[in-house]
Amino acid sequence: MGRRMIKLVLVAWLLATMSFTASAVTVLDPQYKAEVYATYSATDLGAAHGMAFDPDGNLYVTHIGTSGDVSDGSIHRIAPDGSSQLFADGLRFPGNIVWGGGTAYGNYLYVGDAKAGDVLKFDLAGNSTSFARPRREPYALGISNSGNLYCGTRVDDHVDYISPGGVVNNFSNFPYNMPGGPTSIEFDSSGNYGSGLFLSNDGADNDSGIFEINANGIASPFAPDIVTSFRLGFDDAGLFGYSLFTTGMTEFGQLWSMYSIDADGVATQFAHNNSTHLTIFSFGPDGAMYVAEHDGMDTTIISRIALIPEPVTFALLSIGGVLVRMRTRRS
């Protein structure tokens, strides 16, 4: 058992045994509960627009800033114990963030900085370089199961493939000039949803929602009940049925809520907040779902949604299994 697996098991055990306070997120499925994982001051940060974990269980959250154009965007890092600190600043409109570890893109974080026109590459010390310059306003990022990085652009609605060397190639002219634009790119690792690229679009008319793009770059609507979608995520660990989840609406004018979507595209409301939008989320190394809210004033709230009861026993058994294997290898 490698060091990375041991770290993941320890992170899962730590998170399963920590106590959290009640969350304002209401989970409609009685098998799950939501509790506050972390809070931090969001004064002058603007809304959160992206979330990603590194292998050690640190959570990175992008904030677009208050103006949406000048260099006041930032990234915050939340440690597994829920404490937060500034990771990087000076960004112009940071959107999606993904971890490249385990692929040819290496142990780096990649961020679409839309207004700057860059996909930025960050090491874990917070140092950045310009990795690629796709079409106008790179925002949505996703890494496929085969380890390829894709980028959706907000202004001209393209999806580009970016090579590990930073070379940009067009993959799909995802219906050009649609309202809104690509906000999230995800791939299913379970095989239940096929091998296509799934993309969310947050426009305000009938062309918005969730789309599946095939290997030839052709887009088709998926989950017709979702009229506008902001973020997508697949449950790769299986604690949520290996389902696709989205934050979005089934009617324009609603608060953004969380929906689960089955392989046939049928959407079921999973969670909501009565007073504010649910926007971005990510699945953690413990298999739980982490959801960001902005209270409309000065606080960002990260809630953790997990099974009831939480799998403490499973985590302890996993640690025991790691120790047994290590002892066996030594003998």
Image (spheres, helix red, strand yellow):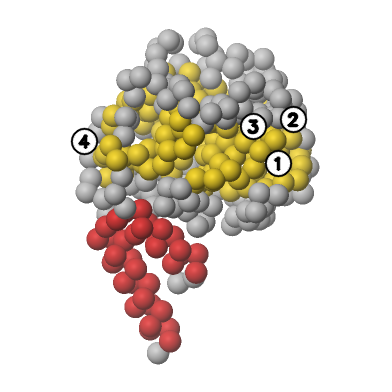
Is 150 situated left or right of 201 in this image?
right
Q: Is residue 75 visible?
A: yes
Q: Are marks 4 and 3 in contact (CB under 8 Å)?
A: no
Q: Secondary structure at mark 3?
A: strand
- Of circles 4 and 3, which is in front? 3
- Do the residues bearing badges 1 and 4 touch, measured as CB atoms within 8 Å? no
- Counting from the top left corner in percent of width and height, residue 242 is at 37, 43
**Residue underneath mark 4:** 30
Of mark 2 and mark 3, the one earlier in the sequence is 3
Distance from disc 4 to disc 2, alpha carbons, whole Å, reads 43 Å
Q: Nearer the viewer, residue 75 or 181?
A: 75
Marks 4 and 2 in Cβ contact (< 8 Å): no
Q: Residue at x 47, y 37 (%)?
A: 40
At 71% across and 30% down in the image, what residue appears? 71
Q: Are marks 1 and 2 in contact (CB under 8 Å)?
A: yes
Quadrant of the frame with the N terminus? bottom left
Q: CA distance from mark 3 to mark 1?
A: 13 Å
Name the residue carrying label 3.
Answer: 73
Categorize mark 4 by other alpha carbons within 10 Å: few (<14), some (14-19), many (20+).
Answer: few
Foreground of the two, 53 or 73: 73
Camera-side mark, 3 or 1: 3
Residue for badge 2: 116
The type of residue carrying mark 1 is: Leu
Q: Identify the mark nearer the N-term, 3 or 1.
A: 3
Q: Which residue is mark 1?
A: 120
